[in-house]
Image (cartoon, helix red, strand yellow):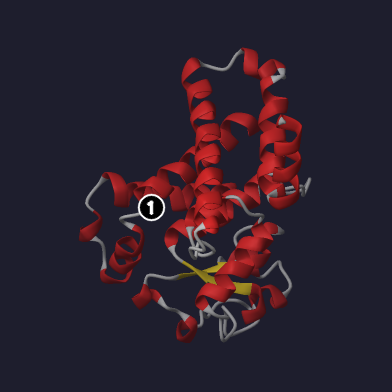
Amino acid sequence: MMNKIYESIRVRYPSIYYELQKIDNFVLSNKFKSCSIEKIKIILKHLEDIENILIQVHCQKNKNNQIEFSIPYMMLLTYNQIIEILLDKYGEVPGNYFLNRKCTQINEYIKRSSEGLQIHHIKENEMKGLSNPEFAQQAPFSYQMGCNLVYCNLLEHFLLHCKIWDHSTNPLQIDVGKNGAQILLNELEKIHFYNAWQYQNYKRKAAQTIFFQKKSFFQIRRFFIVLQIIKS
């Protein structure tokens, strides 16, 4: 029975199947033997999150509810699958991120900060820091084009970077996605643990957009912490 369940997960949600395999390998490794009780509890809670999300998504699908745009559903998907959903949800970015090839002038006309949205560089799964001129200048300018950008809210942005770090196979940049995820987590913790309404105007809308998605925030946060434990 369990084999059939795992096979079903592998076919429908390869990202989750891969994640469960990594956790299984970690538990069987020597690193797990020196793992603190607190870290083990976080791993178990994350596994419980996965179980609950799978049940939630299954029930909502049976009721014909629209779940494709929900954070729980996105957590089950691969990085590329999430990108496709966000493009469908928010539409394409109608221009390049930088106006010049030296990557020194940001294109203000494509921003949707008033809607609480940010811009994510899709190719950051290959190279980090593409919104930073220092790193952007080292990458092909095509990485800055609208076809390689996607709109997302702050929580979705955090999930994207967690997925990048989770699936990174680049031996030259094994931690690609990690720093971006940590920066976004710091921002989200300010929103959820402190007073989010004292932000500058352009940040306040981003905070308001995701403020009431606390459950999803803590689920992705545990996902990030589990990645830290396994990859340390």
Query: In the orientation shown, which residue stands out farthest toward the front?
Result: 63
Query: In the orientation shown, which residue stands out farthest toward the top?
Result: 33
Classed neighbour count for the residue bearing mark 1: other residues with Cα under 10 Å, few (<14), some (14–19), many (≥20)? some
Secondary structure, mark 1, is helix
Q: Residue at x 72, y 19 (%)?
A: 29
Determine whether 111 is above or below 216 in the image. below
Q: Quadrant of the N terminus?
A: top right
Q: Is residue 205 visible?
A: yes
Q: Is residue 10 left or right of residue 87?
A: right
Say which amino acid is labelled 1: Glu
Q: Residue at x 28, y 44 (%)?
A: 193
**x, y percent for residue 100:** 61, 84
Q: Residue at x 46, y 51 (%)?
A: 183
**x, y percent for residue 226:** 56, 34
**x, y percent for residue 118:** 46, 69
Comparing 215 with 221, the one in front is 215
Which residue matches tag 1?
187
Q: Residue at x 49, y 65 (%)?
A: 66
Q: Is residue 28 left or right of residue 177?
A: right
